[in-house]
Image (cartoon, helix red, strand yellow):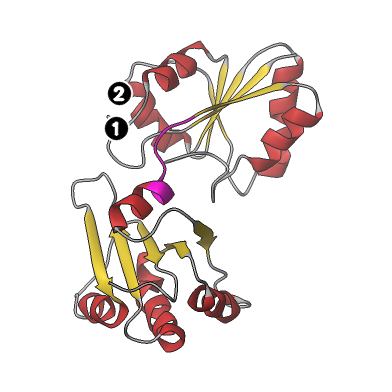
């Protein structure tokens, strides 16, 4: 049997990678990348020269068999996503499950991820929190947002820039103006921003901007939280 490595990669700043992650990538026989072009920037930076193949949400089912064939042949495979930990709102789960089911070793190499980075930076309660990932674009979206509004613990949501205002407006409808939230944008990157405050204030801030760019994490405090 062989080993499938699940390796966290930087969410922005290329320096945010562990020595162990670099060593494991250099020792792996094959590297499965969400986008080979994106991953090549990181790999070239650390002088890692290994065979790559694409492994993303549109080919995940097909490529699981390919990964198993490599593992069954006695070689190791490392899975990386464009940023953060594979399997968290990124491809990885199906391959990890299949590796377990077929008796291979699965080894996760921890590192940066946007969820915990945003929660800690928010200054909102993080002893307990719920991760919602990306909300559905249409069906079920309102139901999920209402559940976030009713939650007594902190909730973390991934959101795209062009949907942020819509999300904050709907959240405001259910939560009211006084709910504490934090919008973390472009974490660890040059234009990193952590905008924290009451919902109405944060919404007004982003509505006044000519454009919203970057990767966004929204942290919503539980309904009983106050300062």
Q: Position of residue 10 (x, y in %)?
A: 36, 36
Q: Residue at x 57, y 70 (%)?
A: 136
- x and y percentages locating residue 119 in the rendered image: 37, 54
The stretch drawn in magenta includes residue 112: yes
Which region of the structure is painted magenta?
Answer: 110-116
Q: In this view, does 194 lie to the left or right of 60?
A: left
Query: Is residue 65 visible to the viewer in this orientation of the structure?
Result: no
Asked whether residue 25 is drawn in magenta, I would say: no
| Image height of 51 relative to 209, above or below | above
- Quick check: marks 1 and 2 in contact, CB under 8 Å? yes
Image point (34%, 31%), residue name: 41
- Say which residue appears at 53% left-offset and 39% top-offset: 86
Task: Indicate whether 87 appears above or below 196.
Answer: above
Above or below for 133 versus 57: below
- In the picture of the structure, the residue carrying the numbered disc 1 is 14
Q: Is residue 68 above or below residue 117?
A: above
Element at badge 1? loop
**Farthest right residue in view:** 102
Of the numbered discs in the image, which one, if any, rests on residue 100? none
Circle 2 Cα neighbour tier, 10 Å, few/some/many (<14 / 14–19 / ≥20): few
Quadrant for the C terminus in the image: bottom left
Q: How much space separates mark 1 and mark 2, taking CA atoms?
A: 8 Å
Q: Name the residue under label 2.
A: 45
Front residue of this view, candidates 137 and 107? 107
> In terms of depth relative to the viewer, which is nearer, 4 or 52?
4
């Amino acid at each position: 049997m062989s080993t499938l490595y699940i390796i966290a990669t930087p969410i922005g700043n290329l320096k945010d990678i562990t020595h162990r992650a670099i060593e494991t990538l250099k020792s792996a026989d094959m590297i499965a990348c969400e986008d080979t072009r994106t991953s090549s920037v990181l790999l070239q930076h650390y002088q890692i020269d290994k065979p790559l193949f694409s492994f993303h949400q549109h080919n995940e089912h097909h490529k699981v068999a390919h990964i198993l064939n490599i593992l069954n042949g006695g070689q190791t495979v490392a899975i990386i996503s464009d940023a953060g930990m594979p399997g968290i709102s990124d491809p990885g789960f199906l391959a990890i499950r299949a590796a377990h089911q077929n008796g291979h070793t699965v080894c996760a190499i921890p590192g940066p991820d946007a969820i915990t980075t945003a929660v800690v930076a928010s200054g909102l309660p993080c002893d307990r929190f719920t991760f919602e990932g990306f909300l559905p674009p249409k069906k079920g979206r309102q139901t999920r947002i209402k559940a976030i509004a009713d939650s007594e613990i902190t909730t973390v949501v991934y959101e795209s820039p062009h949907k942020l205002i819509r999300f904050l407006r709907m959240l405001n409808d259910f939560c009211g103006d006084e709910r504490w939230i934090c919008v973390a944008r472009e974490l660890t990157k040059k234009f990193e921003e952590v905008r924290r405050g009451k919902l109405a204030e944060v919404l007004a801030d982003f509505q006044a901007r000519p454009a919203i760019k970057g990767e966004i994490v929204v942290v919503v405090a539980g309904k009983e939280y106050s300062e």
